[in-house]
Amino acid sequence: MGKLKIILFVFLVLNINAKGQMTSPIAPHPPSHFQEKINSDMNTHPEVNLNKIKSLFESVERTSADLDTCIEMLEQIIKTNGTDSSSILYLSRVYIEKYKLTGNINNSYLDRSVELSTKGIELAPNLPDGHVNRSLAYTYKGMLSEAEADLNKSKMINPRYTRINEAIAELEMKKGNVENGFKNYANAFNSTQEKYLRYVYGKIYGKMLIERGDYIRANNVLEQTHATNIKDIDIVLMLSKSLVETKKTVAALDLLLKVARLIPSNEILSEELSKVAVARSLVFIEMSELKAARLVCAEALSLAKGAGCYYLLGATYLLENNEEEANKNFKMGLEIDKENKKLNSIKALYLMKINQTDLSIPFFEKAIIEETNIPVKVGLLNYFGQYYFDKKANANVAKSLFEQAAALNSKDGLTYYYLGHIKNMVLGQHEEALGDYEIANDMIKKSEYKKKISYELAYAYFQLAEKKWNKKYIDRALELYKKHIAFYPLDKHAASEINSVLVLEKELKSGLLGKIKKLFRDFHKKLFKD
């Protein structure tokens, strides 16, 4: 027990200074050039020293070590002059920032901030800083009624003090009032022209806007904030995301390329650059501009070796049937992408292209779950829908894939053509196919598909006319066949089938006799078919 008392006594001595106050929670380290300069001027220019510390603290490129330097130097100033209210209040603010920088886990920083704020309020009761600082510290400690009391006092002293909005926002969010927190950070950002505070508030406000899906306003706020510190990776990533979400992929790519040149070999930045370059390249691939797609990937690869860009380069060569270059780029991508997580969609298509379809299926299944680019996902579903229909003769699986594609993109004409084709020509669902054909016909411009739709739509009405022996279907079938033959006079199938429709029309007009003839004809067809 005696030893324990001695240890406890030594601990208290080390942590209590000569005046009975707690010392800084920051461990001392060798003085920097900045510290030595302040030491030399300590007694002669105290106000100059505080300004220097402020310039370091309020630098948008401030590091954790800079924050420690600010704390050590301010503690030293206060030790020399215990009534310097400006330094005391500023140090209480710095401790709050240190608490946030350490991940909101070290309450000793908050305790010291409260202690300093209280002393600063006693020395300078006409300044709002002490109450705002103490309110923030109380908020982070969970002492919400005390935080609110300090806030009200700061408003009475100076209701226009910008940092009040920050303190209100933090308190409201701690209470669970996220909307009020959002509004007050918006006010904080819009009400200050101070460079450092605008940077801090812009970063928080921009993040909130992204979380709310308000990407247009996020672009505006984050572009202003990025201009203050172009090397802040967090801001760059947020701005890139909001630009991509507002279809400004080119601007996002330019942003990432610019920053990647300034900060080479940053893994997080490299990954984002590769991802946006892939998105931009996909746009060019959809437009069949393969060279432009390759240029985008090549520029990104010159700064960041991303697996996605190599895969996409491989895909562009694959589309030109250049398997040698495709293989080379795919292998380089796989060397980076050890866990095979990147761009499963392109791997699936690549394996299909080189007739390794069975190997492609697992990648296809992963891609359907993981792929976020809607045009790419629709293309995959259509491609594999055709595969199951043509190669596997599995119309039901193919139909399911085409239906998924249609649900994702109601304006993809090819999806509706495939759906109509399977329902009409294979599954005998002629009536269900009509709507699909009509949509496809409105959207598809390619002549080869126009011809197919024109014929198959007429055929669907012909089959319905046969089954239902209905004048409406007969008239529509005749109208469509005539229109089709006018455009494609060499189509022998259509010419033969229009004659069958004319026979149906004649039978319908003959009444009961015609019905008997049709029944006999149907029986004859079935007999010979069996």
Image: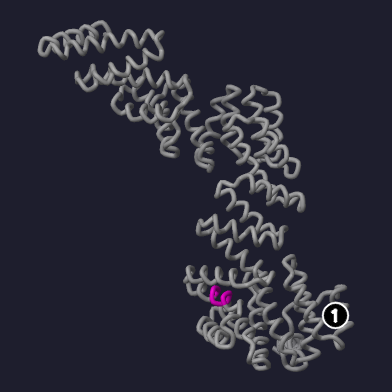
Pick the front one: 44 or 21: 44
Above or below, 213 relative to 15 = above
Q: Residues within 10 Å of mark 1 (few under 14, many from 20)?
A: many
Main SS class of the magenta portion in the image: helix
Q: Residue furthest front?
A: 486
Give the residue furthest to the left. 512
Q: Residue at x 72, y 86 (%)?
A: 86
What is the quadrant of residue 298 in the picture? top right
Give the percent coordinates (x, y) of residue 408.
44, 39
Residue at 74% x, 92% y is 83
Q: Is residue 197 left or right of residue 14?
A: left
Left or right, 495 with respect to 253, comes to left
Residue 373: x, y in percent? 54, 41
The relative height of residue 401 versus residue 263 in the rendered view (above or below) is above
What amino acid is labelled 1 in the image?
Answer: Ile
Q: Which residues are magenta?
A: 165-170
The residue lying toward the viewer, choosing from 516 and 311, is 516
Q: Residue 43 at x, y = what percent?
A: 86, 88
Is residue 8 in view from this perspective? no
Q: Is residue 266 left or right of residue 283?
A: right
The picture places residue 13, in percent across and down from the top left corner, at 76, 89
Viewer-nearest residue: 491 or 312: 491
Looking at the image, the residue that sits furthest to the right is 40
Tell me the SS state at disc 1.
Answer: helix
Q: Is residue 505 magenta?
A: no
Identify the residue at horizontal 28%, vertical 16% (top origin).
Answer: 478
Image quadrant where residue 44 sits: bottom right
Residue 76 showing in the rendered view: yes
Residue underneath mark 1 = 38
Looking at the rendered image, the quarter that the C terminus falls into is top left
Q: How many marks?
A: 1
Q: Quadrant of the N terminus?
A: bottom right
